[in-house]
Image (tube, rainbow, N blue to C red):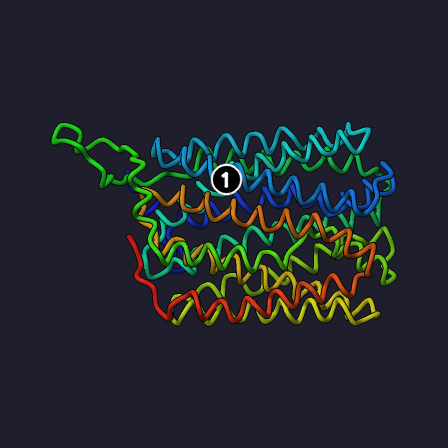
């Protein structure tokens, strides 16, 4: 029986495309909930913007914290698919719980569960992509899966706009509908994704030479190049905070509540348009240069959101924010995959994501306070300043070429 991972579509393994489609459906379901969550919390549950921002920051931190454990578990048992299956199942089960929320505290716990499901998925998924993708197309593979996931977010945002504009269903009913695509994603994943077999380099005897065993000494394989990427990640992610503040910024510029999902739609269009082509470009030129482009877009996004009062220009800032996210996330994970060997890759991604989580938690925690005390302009200009500093750190920390691991 032919191996699905050996089949290729447009030069990429079929397994990469299937993982991308699973991500599309999961993101479609997630965005149907989270594109209106700030509005739901503020108008129906009475949450303040500072509360929304701090909940965003905390639950994202929880998601990133889980990623280090899920990545390590996938490495230890050499079964990334089983860990991913748990994450996708939890993602499906938690969606209808939002429809029953009666308080901010309830939302906090449900969102934590949802972010735990996201955290379970991230590290083993990115490690599995690295396992499936040959060296020469890793950037394209990560870019494609990012673009397909973003397409799911775009479709989800568009659906929400259409549903809220042309029907009178409640937000709670909308949350119930989000369970459907999440269920299809789980079915597609279980029956169509095949995990490749790898011989582990850590063997202790001839009798064990075919066993796949994780050894903690593998951490020694995380070299200086890897830790420099981690440092750069920590610096740049301080420029980010929860997307709820993008929603608040556009609302303050005059966007009507029924059109609020347009914010995430525009954000995801920005991601979708750049993730795959720029990921593929990074396979043929220095990833460092492509990453610099993402940092520059973040500067432009922050400045635009800070100084303009036009809804159109604020939306342009949202688009740029999404575009930089599509570039930087694809290139960061490509760099991590480049410098880490297969048998420790899940753990390496886990460390990467917990670093992101700590930085985003810090930035989101203080974002609401900065906005309340000094206004949105100071908040977004601070983001632009950190991004500018990241440009200098990029050339200090990341060499022009990195040695790619198998």
Looking at the picture, how far across and down is residue 36, in whole percent? 77, 45
Q: How many residues crowd around disc 1 within 10 Å: few (fewer than 14), some, or many (20 or more)?
A: many
Left or right position of 272 against 134: right
Question: Measuring 55% from the left and 42% from the top, which residue is drawn there?
Answer: 64
Q: How many marks?
A: 1
Question: Measuring 17% from the left and 29% from the top, which residue is drawn there?
Answer: 208
Question: Measuring 74% from the left and 57% from the top, which residue is drawn there?
Answer: 246
Q: Secondary structure at mark 1?
A: helix
Residue 75 picture quarter: top left
Looking at the picture, how far across and down is residue 127, in whole percent? 40, 45
Q: In the picture shown, does residue 33 fall above or below 257?
A: above
Looking at the picture, how far across and down is residue 141, in whole percent? 43, 56
Residue 300 picture quarter: bottom right
Looking at the picture, how far across and down is residue 287, in whole percent? 43, 67
Question: Measuring 74% from the left and 47% from the top, which residue is drawn there?
Answer: 53
Which one is in front, 8 or 201?
201
Q: Which residue is mark 1?
A: 67
Q: Quarter of the image containing the N terminus? A: top left
Q: In the picture shown, does residue 354 fall above or below 264?
A: above
Left or right position of 135 against 166: left
The answer to whether one can see residue 301 in this image is yes
Left or right position of 296 against 164: left
Q: Residue furthest front?
A: 373
Q: In the picture shown, does residue 290 fall above or below 43?
A: below
The answer to whether one can see residue 33 in this image is no
Q: In the picture shown, does residue 11 fall above or below 115?
A: below
Which one is in front, 73 or 394?
394
């Amino acid at each position: 029986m032919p191996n699905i991972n050996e089949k290729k579509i447009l030069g990429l393994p079929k397994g990469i495309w299937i993982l991308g489609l699973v991500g599309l459906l999961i993101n479609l379901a997630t965005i149907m909930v989270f594109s209106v969550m700030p509005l739901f919390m503020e108008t129906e549950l009475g949450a303040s913007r500072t509360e929304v921002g701090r909940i965003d920051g905390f639950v994202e931190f929880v998601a990133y914290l889980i990623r280090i454990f899920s990545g390590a578990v996938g490495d230890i048992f050499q079964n990334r698919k089983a860990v991913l299956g748990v994450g996708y199942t939890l993602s499906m089960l938690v969606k209808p719980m939002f429809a029953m929320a009666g308080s901010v505290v309830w939302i906090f716990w449900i969102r934590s569960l949802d972010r735990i499901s996201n955290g379970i998925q991230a590290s083993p998924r990115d490690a599995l992509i690295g396992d499936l993708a040959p060296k020469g197309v890793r950037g394209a593979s990560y870019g494609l899966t990012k673009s397909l996931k973003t397409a799911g977010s775009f479709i989800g945002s568009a659906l929400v706009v259409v549903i809220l504009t042309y029907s009178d269903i409640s937000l709670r009913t909308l949350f119930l509908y989000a369970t459907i695509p999440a269920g299809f994603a789980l079915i597609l994943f279980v029956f169509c994704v095949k995990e490749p077999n790898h011989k582990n380099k850590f063997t202790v005897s001839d009798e064990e030479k075919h066993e796949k065993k994780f050894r903690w000494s593998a951490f020694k394989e995380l070299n200086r190049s890897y830790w420099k990427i981690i440092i750069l990640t920590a610096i740049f992610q301080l420029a980010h905070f929860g997307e709820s503040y993008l929603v608040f910024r556009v609302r303050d510029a005059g966007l009507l509540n029924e059109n609020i999902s347009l914010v995430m739609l525009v954000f995801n269009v920005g991601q979708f348009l750049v993730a795959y082509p720029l990921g593929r470009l990074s396979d043929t030129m220095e990833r460092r240069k492509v990453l610099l482009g993402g940092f520059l877009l973040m500067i432009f996004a922050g400045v635009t959101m800070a100084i303009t009062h036009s809804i159109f220009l604020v939306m342009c800032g949202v688009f740029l924010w999404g575009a930089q996210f599509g570039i930087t996330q694809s290139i960061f994970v490509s760099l991590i995959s480049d410098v880490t060997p297969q048998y420790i890759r899940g753990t390496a991604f886990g460390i990467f994501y917990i670093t992101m989580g700590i930085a985003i938690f810090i930035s989101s925690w203080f974002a609401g306070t900065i906005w309340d005390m000094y206004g949105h302009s100071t908040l977004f200009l601070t983001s632009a300043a950190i991004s500018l500093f990241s440009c200098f750190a990029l050339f200090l920390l990341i060499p022009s070429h990195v040695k790619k691991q198998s």
